[in-house]
Amino acid sequence: MIRMNDMILLKLGELILKGLNKKQFERRLIANIERRLKTFGEFRVYSAQSAIYIEPLSDNCDMDRAFTAMCKVFGVVSVSRAVACPKDADRIFETARAYLKDELSQAGSFKVESKRSDKRFPMTSIDLSRYVGGKLHDAFPHLTVDVHTPELIVNIEVRDFAAYVHTGGTPGAGGLPVGSGGRAVSLLSGGIDSPVSTYMIAKRGISIIPVHFFSFPYTSELAKQKVLDIAAVLLPYCGKLTVEIVPFTKIQEEIRRLCPEEYLTLIMRRFMMRIADRIAQKNGCGALCTGENLGQVASQTMEALAVTEDCTSLPVLRPLIGFDKEEIVSLARKIGTYELSILPYEDCCTVFTPRHPRTKPSVSEVVEAEKPLDIEALVQEAIQGIERLPIVT
Ligand code: ATP
Ligand code: MG
């Protein structure tokens, strides 16, 4: 439902601090916002005074869903539903009375808080709060004024073009606008960890190319669909996603056929890194990202990380490296990927897990162990077979 002059007001985060980059960041953020809003109607989006204004251009704009979507856009610290009115104390009061009628009727106590970025406005913030607060008190006599812990805060912002009334913002997603920091390939399994690591790197302003290694028929179509569903949950944060599905069966079978069992996982992970590296080079990516975490499993000791990282010259970003499992799970729940991740479909690692994996491997012994393989041919063949699936909402 749209109420008169109903709009969404976004406060910007870290990018305020970025000085010269600021304009570029704002442009990027506005483009990301416009892309997200497309399915909810036609909006006008513009920035002024370290805020972004989103105004519906027609009655059929879905403001509720637009609001929810804006809470997932990186680069925004707070999101408010607000209403615009002329910069005049009585008009501001009338607007607050009408727009917040339900909230004011239901609350027991309230206060008015004003901010004035237009310093030409004739009243000080304190005077404006007092004036509007007094008139609202007259209009809703059941209310008490409580300046310390009010049930309702009526916010007034006097800005360049208009005054805005709202009841405070919901926290935004924080971070930096996706795309402002370049691109990375993210290795996305169907597990709990890599959706979270993907989210965390996107939050730092990085566009993501998700890559999934798929071992059909050892892993089923359902396992692939699960990864696509996880990507769909990540889409509102990441902006734009095309999942690259890499056929991985032959590589795994060849490793199992020709290499010592204790190295299966390590050699398999080296292939993932090699292929991710090629995809990264092709797409101008500056890094790879994984959900690896020190010490969780045998393939995630420092020695094992060194062995896998040996196959790429790009930095490998591992945002979960120091997290406890509970911390990862609680983030996964917050993002909304957890329920999908725990669906019980097999993944390529569990299917080929050695009974006694090497936990302290050296690069040279693994290189020796993978010697029987025609590495370049296997990598080439896998890359030829990549399937690209754009995620749409
Ligand atoms: P996750 O919960 O992300 O699956 P994990 O704790 O199960 O992680 P591993 O299975 O050792 O750990 O995988 C470590 C990382 O390697 C994953 O976080 C992911 O980034 C990448 N990875 C593993 N399997 C795949 C796959 N099939 N496709 C793409 N990336 C993968
Ligand atoms: Mg896994």
Image (cartoon, rainbow, N blue to C red):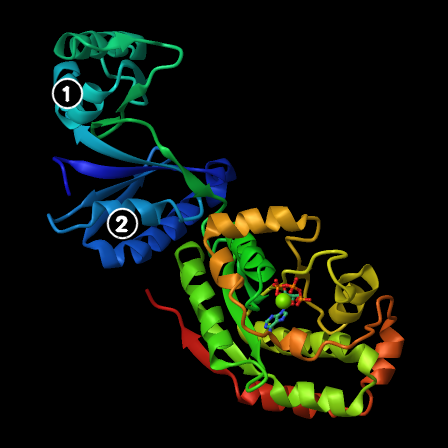
In the displayed structure, 43 sits above or below 377; it is: above
Q: Residue at x 17, y 50 (%)?
A: 61
Residue 74 shows in this picture: yes
Q: Residue at x 18, y 46 (%)?
A: 56
Residue 114 position in % (x across, y down): 30, 17
Q: Which label sits on residue 97? A: 1
Q: Is residue 279 left or right of residue 232?
A: right
In the picture as drawn, the residue positioned furthest to the front comes out as 344
Q: Is residue 353 left or right of residue 160?
A: right
* Type of amino acid under label 1: Arg
Q: How many numbered discs?
A: 2
Q: Quadrant of the N terminus?
A: top left
Mark 2 neighbour class, 10 Å CA radius: few under 14, some 14 to 19, many 20 or more = few
Question: Who comes first in sequence, dot 2 or dot 1?
Answer: 2
In the displayed structure, 96 sits above or below 6; it is: above
365 and 217: which is toward the camera:
217
Residue 204 shows in this picture: no
Determine the image quadrant of residue 377.
bottom right
In the displayed structure, 25 sits above or below 14; it is: below
Distance in Å between CA atoms under marks 2 and 1: 25 Å
Disc 2, ligand 1: is the CB inside 8 Å?
no
Q: Residue at x 41, y 45 (%)?
A: 23
Residue at image mark 2: 65
Residue 391 position in % (x across, y down): 39, 69
Assign a secondary structure to mark 2.
Answer: helix
Residue 196 position in % (x across, y down): 55, 55
Q: Is residue 231 left or right of residue 328?
A: left
176 and 212: which is toward the camera:
212
Q: Quadrant of the C terminus?
A: bottom left
Q: Which quarter holds ligand 1?
A: bottom right
In the displayed structure, 2 sits above or below 218; it is: above
